[in-house]
Each structure stands twice: as C-alpha cells, then as structure tokens.
Image (spheres, coloured by chain):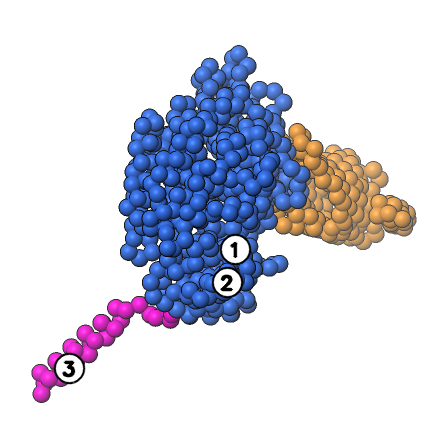
C-alpha cells in the first residue's frame, strides 16, 4: 500500500512536470487587418510587439494570437480579423485591379479584399501560388515582422530636388551600354523556352547567369538557394563587386530571371522577354561594365528566382540580409523595362514613402544618363516585384517598370518575345539605371584624393542657465592625400547636399552650429587634394538633434562636477 | 508706472519718513563670495565674487532700514550634453537693489543685525561667441544677518551673510525653473555718516 502511494505521487509529479514543459497556449494565430489613418498609433504596435507582416498603402496586415488581440483591444487599436487560422500557411497579397480579377481569385481559393485593388489569398490545400489565376501579380507575406515607418514621405510637399550634376566619368561608363549586348542577353534567356521557377529550364537559366557573371571578373559569384511553396526549390544568383572604401555598404541592382505564362503552357513555354529577361540582361550589362572600375561601395548584382510565384527568391534574400544586419544603401529593381506602348515612353519609378530619395535620384540619373523621362510614384501598396521584400526589411528600394498599370499586351503570354521590344527605350532605361548605380557606388577616379572614411555625426547640446545651442559634431579619419575637406549637409537623406564650410577644413573635425532641433541632418565629407581636385563623398552620417531631457543633462553635469570640472 | 519707478518712489517715501526719526546712517562697502543654490549655476560659473554698497539707517529703538546696490559678474562655459568637443564661453551679470528692515543689537563695539526684505534683480546671460542672450528681472525675498565691529572713529569692520531665493520661471535643457538664489558671504568696511 505504501509503495502504491509513493508510486502514485511520483506519477503525479512527473505528470505535472510534463504539462509544465509546454508553453502557455496563446490561442490560434489570426491574420488581422489594421487600418491606417490620421493619428495611427504605430508606436502602440511597436510597443505591443505586434507581428506586422505587410504594410500596404491604407492598412497593415499582421499575425496576432489571442493575447495580441486582447492587447490591441485594450489599447483601442481598430482592427478586423481576416482569418483565425493563419498559422503555418502561405498567405499571398494579390493585386486585383478589377471586380473580375477579385471574382477569379475567389473562385480559386479564399480571397478577402483588404483595400481597393488588393486582396489576401490562401488555399486550404496545395500551394496558393499555383492556384492564383495567371496574370495576377502576387506577393507572399513576409516571413518575419516588417519594419513599419509611418512618417510622412521623405521630402513630401517640397520642391523637386536638385539633380545631381552630371559626372563625366559616369557619362563615360553609361556610354559603354551596348544595345546588341542587351538584345543577345534577352535572346539567350528567351531561348530557354521557359524559366518558370519550378522547371529544370529555370535552373539551367540560373546556371547560365552564374556562368556569365563568373566570366566578368567580379569578386564573388554564388548561388543562394531557397525553398518555396512547400516542396519546390530554386536559387538566386548573386554576384559582387567589392567596394574598396566601404566594402560593407552595399548597393543592389536586381531583376528576376524566372518567367511565367498561362497555366497550360508555363511549364514548357514562357519566354518572358520583357518580364523579365529585359531586367536581367540590364543587370548583367551593368555588371559587365562596372566590373572594370574600382568603386567606393560594394555592388551586388542579383538575379532572383520565383518572383512570379510570389517573390519567394527576394523574400529569402532580403530576410537573410536583414538577419545578417547588412547595410544596404539602396536597391534598384528592374522589372519589365523594354516595351514601349507609345513614344516617347517614360519609365515608372515606384517607391514606398521611406524610399522617396532613391526615386528622386533615379529621376536625376534618367535625365543625365538616359536620357529618359521618368515618373515617380509613391505607393506602399505596389508590392508585386522584388523591391517589396526590401521594403519589408526597412531598406530603401525602387522598382523601375515601363508602365503602371501595365500596357504590354504580351505580359505573361507565350508571345512575350524580344521582337516586341523598343530597343532605344530598353537601352535608355539601362543607361539610366546604370547611371544611378554608379552614382551610388562611386567609381574611384585616378589622381583624385581618396574618399574619407569613418565619418560620424553626433548631436551635442550646449546649455547655459537660460539658453541652449544645438550643434552637430562631425569627425572622420584623416586621409594622407588630402589637403583639406569639404563638408556637405542636407535635410533629405542622399539629396540636395549643400556645402557648409566657408573655407577648406584642414582638420578632421567640424562643428555645425547652425542646426534646428526639429529637423534631421545628414552629412557627407569629401577630400580635396593639393592640386584642388575634389574626390568622392564619404558615406552619409545623420543625426536628429533633439534637446535631451533635463534629467540627462543634470546627470552629465553631475558627472562633470564629480570629475572636478568647473 | 514700472517696477523700477515704484521701488524708487517707495524708497524715497520710506527714506524721508525714516530720516525724520533717524539716529544713525552708515555706508558699507563689501565684497565676498556667492554660492548659488542651483547646481547648474555652480557647474557653469563656479564660485562668484559679488560686491555691494549699502546704506544703513538706524531708527529709534533697535529697528533700522537698509537699501543699496549689489552686483555680480561671472564667466564660465556652456555645459555639453553629449560628447564634448567645442567650447562656448558664457557670461552672467546680475545687479540687485535690496530694501530691508532689520533689528540691531549692540553689544559694546559690536553691532549685530538680523533682517529681511525684498530685492529687485536684473540679470543677463550672454554667449560670447554665439548670438544668444537672455535678460530678465525679478523681485524676490531676502534674508540676512550682518555684523559691524567698531574700529577707529567712524570706521567699522563689516560682514554679512545673505540668503536669496530667486525663481525666474525660465528653463533650459539643464534646469527647469532656474533659481538664481543662494548664499552670499561678504566682508568689508562700514563708515558712519552721522
């Protein structure tokens, strides 16, 4: 009897231990829609650690468990539940420009409109990517929490930015763009018949791109494999030209090399010349040309796969880059840049609010190096190409595309072939893209002083009893070939720099005491040689000088007094 | 009528009224040290060297009236909040006109005064290398203790300790509601006029 009691006690204790090893259940995972609007409490979402997986123009899509939902309700955040069963399933955001498109999507699975022209879509079984009707652009939800930035668009409401002056070296570089090279690149990709991401032809085309990159004398060429839609795998092709001054700061030019066509033919015939052999050929041409030049910043030339399935290749790449904490200066995504429905054709440049500067720089490069007309559109809901996963990661990225909405009648058809191209437009679009890429990566000029490194900008508030002065203190590393330095400043990152030093700065520090508390400031420094030649500008350093709270100030003061200061 | 004129009229009336009953009038000149109660003030300017000139009118009995002029001028440097790099010298000036009532106790050659009153202050802070300045004025209470020790004839040694609290209502990143008050210790001489 006694043994039985001991046995039962031990059994109960083991049972309790076993149960306690499970985490407390937080209930089913729901997909919720949180509308944006005036006074939207983004800080509340951040504070509550809500798992936002997609930012759109008018709303956010987030995954939330029972506890999150209770928190949102307690904090007065408006939201609606789209599905209570979002765990472990691919959910797509699909562009539905017409009621017919939405109806077609609903006939293929579960579709819910989340804003005009946008629906979320999933299927109970199978891959939703394969179920989406052909021709509807789609993006799979981010694999991790996206960075939401609801500040007003950078530079919103301001005059058009000053175009960056045309650089003779970059002019020479873009003159190397060869229309025959572009055409033959498209033809080579088109010749794979199909590059639908699940096919062996797509894999072969990836190998072809790898081989081309490998023959250009770049620093590194590699495959970046990933899985998608459950059981498929494919690989991005990544080539790198390492920067000599800032090897860890990366500019990306990318395009997807996979293609599609109607479901009946896509496994055998999807030439995808405009979509997107055109962008891929432009990336290869940019790599061919810039491989010849030493650069300040690293460039990665990337051909993504499985874009047509829902941006799986770029999603995997951008998530890995964010995970690794990579510093990506900007992403230029080329997708359909060779078809012109009317001349003169202009290129559409699409950005989210945080990437506005990149579009402005593209517009300047289009004028300087296309020459080409270009139109900027700020639309956080345009998430249907490989720039969007970079937006999710908080990186500046743009999409360059021939038309929005598309006018190419051969889009996603078996007739999307090279003979439909306007080669002049294709060449100009490539020149403009290469021009911006070179501007961002900064070719190093022989005979010019080296680009300054180590620039840091620190806000310092100097306070007396009744007054305070906010300054920004800049420091950088000395360059042996520099006779002095010029300091440039702007309130808009990467745009409209103005020189702020009256005479050449001979030291390696500078204090800017002409700043306001309510504006961000961004700085770059360039070195001037003994002969007066001015080199490239450093990477940007920025600050938002805010008045520190009095308590922090007093702490500083106390430490000074303790240290025996006045 | 502005504050300065009101004080002047008040002083005149008070002086005339008091003079009718005056037993003794003396002038003191003193200088010394001021320790601000505000930590930030001490951090920026350190110990100060104020000076004052006061007239002391002793009435019948132990009561008396005092009025005068005091000044303070300091130099220091602005406090950096963040990584220090540059130096911004600053200058502070304060002038004060006190009017006090006191009780005097004479023990042989020593006279001890305890009193309170008001003090009108005018102050100004200026940044030497940047176009920044602040000016203000304030009337505040004053409490003091003073002593004289007779020397020769009309001359006496003079010493005083004064406490002011001067909340200005102004703030900066360093201080919320700057108080310019503190304790002032002065020493000097006193000359008996009659």
Chain for disc number 2: A
Residue at the spot x=51%, y=40% of the render?
Answer: A339
Distance, label 3 to label 2, CA atoms, is 61 Å
Residue closer to the observer: B110 or B7: B7
Residue receiving disc 1: A56
Chain for disc number 3: A
If you read the primary sequence from the N terminus, does the residue marked by circle 3 or circle 2 appear first? 3
Residue receiving disc 2: A102
Q: Is residue B13 above or below residue A520?
A: below
- Local packing at callout 1 (Cα closer than 10 Å; few below 14, some 14-19, many 20+) is many
Cβ atoms at labels 3 and 1 below 8 Å apart: no
Chain A's colour is blue
Q: Which residues are magenta?
A: A1-28
Q: Main secondary structure of the magenta part?
A: helix
Q: Residue furthest top?
A: A531
Q: Is residue A497 above or below residue A466?
A: above
Q: Are marks 3 and 1 on the same chain?
A: yes
Q: Is residue A50 above or below residue B102?
A: below
Q: Position of residue A7 (x, y in %)?
A: 12, 80
Residue closer to the observer: B139 or B26: B139
Q: Position of residue A335 (x, y in %)?
A: 46, 42
State the SS at label 2: helix
Q: Position of residue B110 (x, y in %)?
A: 70, 44
Residue receiving disc 3: A8
User: Is-magenta flag for residue A327?
Assistant: no
Chain for disc number 1: A
Chain B's colour is orange
Residue at the spot x=31%, y=30% of the render?
Answer: A214
């Amino acid at each position: 009897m006694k043994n039985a009691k001991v046995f039962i006690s031990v059994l109960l204790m083991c049972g309790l231990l076993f149960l306690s090893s499970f985490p407390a259940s937080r209930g089913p995972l729901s997909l919720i829609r949180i509308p944006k609007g005036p006074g939207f409490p983004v800080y509340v979402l951040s504070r509550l650690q809500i798992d936002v997986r997609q930012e759109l123009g008018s709303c956010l899509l987030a995954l939330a468990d029972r506890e999150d939902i209770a928190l949102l309700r307690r904090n007065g955040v408006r939201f609606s539940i789209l599905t209570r069963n979002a765990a472990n399933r691919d959910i797509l955001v699909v562009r539905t420009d017409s009621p017919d498109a939405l109806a077609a999507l609903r006939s293929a699975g579960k579709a819910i409109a989340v804003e005009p022209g946008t629906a979320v879509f999933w299927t109970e079984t199978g891959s939703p990517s394969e179920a989406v009707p052909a021709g509807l652009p789609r993006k799979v939800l981010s694999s991790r929490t996206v960075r939401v930035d609801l500040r007003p668009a950078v530079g919103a409401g301001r005059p058009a930015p000053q175009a960056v002056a045309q650089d003779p070296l970059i002019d020479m570089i873009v003159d190397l763009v060869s229309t025959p090279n572009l055409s033959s690149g498209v033809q080579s990709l088109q010749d794979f018949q199909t590059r639908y991401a699940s096919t062996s032809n797509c894999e072969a085309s990836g190998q072809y791109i790898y081989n081309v990159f490998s023959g250009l004398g770049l620093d590194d060429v590699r495959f970046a494999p990933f899985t998608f839609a459950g059981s498929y795998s494919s690989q991005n092709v990544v080539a790198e030209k390492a920067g000599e001054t800032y090897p860890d700061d990366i500019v990306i030019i990318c395009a997807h090399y996979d293609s599609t066509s109607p479901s009946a033919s896509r496994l055998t015939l999807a030439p995808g010349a405009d979509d997107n052999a055109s962008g891929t050929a432009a990336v290869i041409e940019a790599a061919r040309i810039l491989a010849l030049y030493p650069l300040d910043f690293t460039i990665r030339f990337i051909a993504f796969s499985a874009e047509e399935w829902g941006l799986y290749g770029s999603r995997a790449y951008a998530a890995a880059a964010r995970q690794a904490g990579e510093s990506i200066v900007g992403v230029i995504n080329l997708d359909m840049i060779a078809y012109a429905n009317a001349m003169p054709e202009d290129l559409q440049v699409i950005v989210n609010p945080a990437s506005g500067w990149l579009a402005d720089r593209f517009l300047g490069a289009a004028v300087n190096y296309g020459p080409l007309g270009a139109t900027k559109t700020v639309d956080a809901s345009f998430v249907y190409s490989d720039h969007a996963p970079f937006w999710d990661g908080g990186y500046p990225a743009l999409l360059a595309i021939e038309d929005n909405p598309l006018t190419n009648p051969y889009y996603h058809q078996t007739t999307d072939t090279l003979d439909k191209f306007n080669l002049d437009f294709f060449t100009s679009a490539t020149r403009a893209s290469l021009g911006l890429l070179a501007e961002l990566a900064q070719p190093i000029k022989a005979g010019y002083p080296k680009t300054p490194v180590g620039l840091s900008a620190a806000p310092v508030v100097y306070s007396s009893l009744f007054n305070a002065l906010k300054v920004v203190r800049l420091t950088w590393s000395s360059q042996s070939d520099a006779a002095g330095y010029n300091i440039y400043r702007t309130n808009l990152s990467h745009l409209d720099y103005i020189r702020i030093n009256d005479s050449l700065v001979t030291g390696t520090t500078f204090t800017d005491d002409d700043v306001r508390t309510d504006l961000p400031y961004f700085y770059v420094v360039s070195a001037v040689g003994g002969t007066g030649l001015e080199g490239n500008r450093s990477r940007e350093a920025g600050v938002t000088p805010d008045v520190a709270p009095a308590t922090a100030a007093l702490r500083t003061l106390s430490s000074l007094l303790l240290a025996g200061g006045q | 009528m502005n504050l300065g004129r009101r004080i002047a009229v008040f002083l005149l009336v008070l002086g005339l009224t008091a003079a009718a009953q005056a037993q003794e009038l003396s002038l003191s000149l003193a200088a010394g040290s001021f320790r601000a109660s505000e930590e930030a003030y001490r951090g920026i300017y350190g110990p100060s060297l104020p000076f004052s000139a006061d007239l002391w009118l002793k009435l019948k009995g132990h009561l008396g009236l005092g009025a005068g002029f005091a000044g303070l001028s300091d130099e220091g440097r602005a406090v950096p909040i963040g990584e220090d790099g540059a130096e911004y010298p600053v200058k502070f000036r304060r002038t004060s006109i006190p009017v006090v009532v006191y009780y005097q106790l004479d023990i042989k050659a020593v006279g001890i005064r305890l009193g309170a009153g008001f003090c009108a202050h005018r102050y100004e802070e200026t940044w030497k290398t940047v176009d920044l300045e602040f000016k203000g004025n304030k009337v505040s209470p004053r409490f003091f203790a003073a002593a004289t020790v007779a020397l020769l004839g009309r001359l006496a040694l003079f010493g005083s300790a004064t406490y002011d609290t001067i909340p200005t209502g102004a703030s900066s990143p360093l201080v919320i509601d700057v108080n310019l008050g503190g304790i002032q210790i002065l020493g000097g001489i006193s000359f008996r006029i009659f």
